[in-house]
Amino acid sequence: MWNLIRIAVTRTAVGTWLGKIPFVRRAYDQYYWSRKMNAFSGVYQTYESAAAACEMDHHRVGWNDADLAQNLVTDDVPRRRSLGDAGEFKAADKPVFVGQTSTFAVLLWLSKLVKPGCRIVDVGGAGGIVYWQYRDYFKLPDGATWTVVDMPETVARGRAAAERAGTTELTFETDLAAIKACDILISSGCIQYMPPEGFATFCKISELADAVIINKIALVDRPNYWSRQSFVSTSSPYLFANGRQFIQIFTDSGLKLKDCWHVPEITRDIAFAPRHRLSQTTGVVFVR
């Protein structure tokens, strides 16, 4: 029943009409959106207005959440899975399971860009998921380092897993502004959650980098807008960025757009805003 209601309010003109009825929106947000992982609701003109709506329903905003961190970072290093003789999936001896095909575009570009001694900064990298995926296919060159910047709850779990794995290449940081050196900057599904000041810091760090890889960003052909995404225990504003303006931010700093790809495995359905439905997100690479 709820699935039919979700489809009606996110993909049909009925949703636009229902969104004009305040008690319908409130009921949907209370009984579905706030209880459903990765559900979206509402369109807002600013981060601040989306954050205020998140706080109204969840009383918590942002990614620094113990339950969310536990979902993102397991107690052990994630394991890659492979097909067994009978066709079933089985655990293999190497990390890591690549669950989204767009990750291979990131890994491909990293294989081309990573050089001995390079400093990789991975913003929103959770427990170092892209690091472990890279390590599954390539050897990190001598002297190269990989720093994940994320929320304290997530970093604590990621650091503990890295220590158990005995890796010294992977380090963690909770303060993005503390990053003073960077050769390759990565964000794989993170910067759309940043407040404007956080994204400004990300852009400043990108000016230090020779390459910037951004995956799973929601790019649209209309002015920027925000929605809000539920993680059940918390929630966050979510940016839908004007594609032309987004790319220009980085090309204005001397970077050149080198590649882009579609991410069809990630779609965005927003309650009461079917015209804002996004059938895929995007990945981009900039090289100086």
Image (cartoon, rainbow, N blue to C red):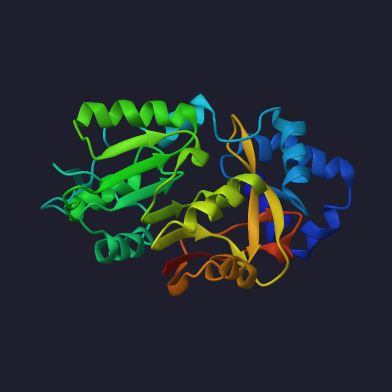
Residue 11 location, quadrant:
bottom right
Which quadrant of the rendered structure holds the C terminus? bottom left
Q: How many marks?
A: 0
Q: Position of residue 184 (x, y in %)?
A: 37, 56
Q: Nearer the viewer, residue 89 or 188?
A: 188
**Quarter of the image with the N terminus in it:** top right
> Measured from the top left, where is residue 104 in percent x and y?
32, 62
Q: Residue furthest left?
A: 85
Residue 88 seen in render: no
The residue positioned 68% from the left and 39% from the top of the image is 32
Q: Please identify the quarter of the rendering in which residue 25 is found.
A: top right
Left or right of 25 in this view: 251: left
Residue at (40% x, 26% y) in the render:
156
The residue positioned 59% from the left and 50% from the top of the image is 199
From this view, report whether residue 94 is shown above or below residue 254: above
- Residue at x-position 61% and y-position 51%: 200
Provide residue 211's location: percent of width, then percent of height: 39, 63
Q: Nearer the viewer, residue 34 or 212?
A: 212
